[in-house]
Image (tube, grey):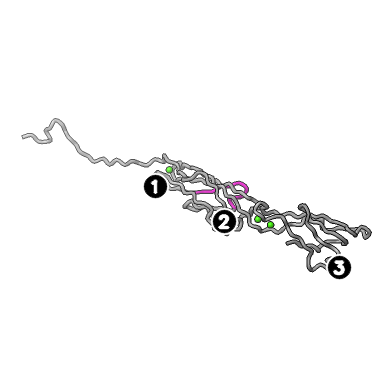
Amino acid sequence: GTDAWENKYRVGEATVIVRILDVNDNAPSFEKVQQIVRISEDAPLGTVVAKVPAFDLDQNRNGLVRYSLAGRRGSSLHFGIDHTGTIRTIGLVDREAISKHSLVVHATDHGVPPRQSSATVTVEIDDVNDNAPIFTGPTYVNVHRKNIEGFTIFFNLTDPDDWSVGHGPPFSAQLDPRAPSSIRKAVSVAYKRGEYHLCHSCSSYTKVLSFI
Ligand SMILES: [Ca+2]
Ligand SMILES: [Ca+2]
Ligand SMILES: [Ca+2]
């Protein structure tokens, strides 16, 4: 008889497991590469500002995304990003100091070498009326006695808040009710064309005025 050992053609058999090894050929991809959001100037710490998740089609470490945040003018002191791509306030914001923050979010995978994408988030700060008008002078005025009658002193007020939303002028001004009655009788405050002026007899207004 004929057995396999005598067969001219030897047939072997083996199982080959083919593993497709993932290559880090995808960078993380943001759902939105550009966003403009608004938060209030009085937003408490931890306020969610924006969500900027990124997805990576690769497997395992090649698809694992970590986030980092960059911003100019110290913006990174005010905002932080967590492992889900959520940006929150980590410091208080001040519209009068910086009214708009431009943040750059980087999403980086854990591949070797890593691949990275970026997105931008512009955070506009809505004003809160957190500043009283500022008296810019004069703070001390000498008036000669013979010129007292009808003497007018003009002074200026300003306000660093957003005037376009009504957090600035027109202002109202009044004499400090704690001022001596002799001064309150002699002096009046008027508002005209963006300036305040004091009328009539008074030699010094230091600490006489207050503003509301
Ligand atoms: Ca990847
Ligand atoms: Ca104000
Ligand atoms: Ca303000």
Q: Position of residue 68 (x, y in %)?
A: 52, 48
Which quadrant of the frame does ligand 1 lie within? Answer: top left
Q: Amino acid at mark 3?
A: Ser
Frontmost of labels 1 and 2 is: 2
Give the spatial CA distance, label 1 vs label 3: 83 Å
Q: Nearer the viewer, residue 152 or 129?
A: 152
Q: Which residue is mark 3?
A: 182
Q: Quadrant of residue 112?
A: top left
Q: Which mark is residue 90?
A: 2
Frontmost of labels 3 and 2 is: 3
Give the spatial CA distance, label 1 vs label 2: 31 Å
Disc 3 packing (10 Å; few <14; some 14–19; many ≥20) = few
Residue found at x 57% / y 54%: 39
Give the spatial CA distance, label 3 vs label 2: 52 Å
Q: Amino acid at mark 2?
A: Ile
Q: Position of residue 150 (x, y in %)?
A: 88, 58
Q: Which residue is mark 1?
A: 60
Q: Is mark 1 within 8 Å of ligand 1?
A: no
Q: Secondary structure at mark 2?
A: loop
Q: Quadrant of residue 24?
A: top left
Q: Amino acid at mark 1?
A: Asn
Q: Quadrant of the N terminus?
A: top left
Q: Quadrant of residue 208?
A: bottom right
Is 20 placed left or right of 127 in the picture? left
Task: Please provide the residue range marked out in magenta.
Answer: 67-77
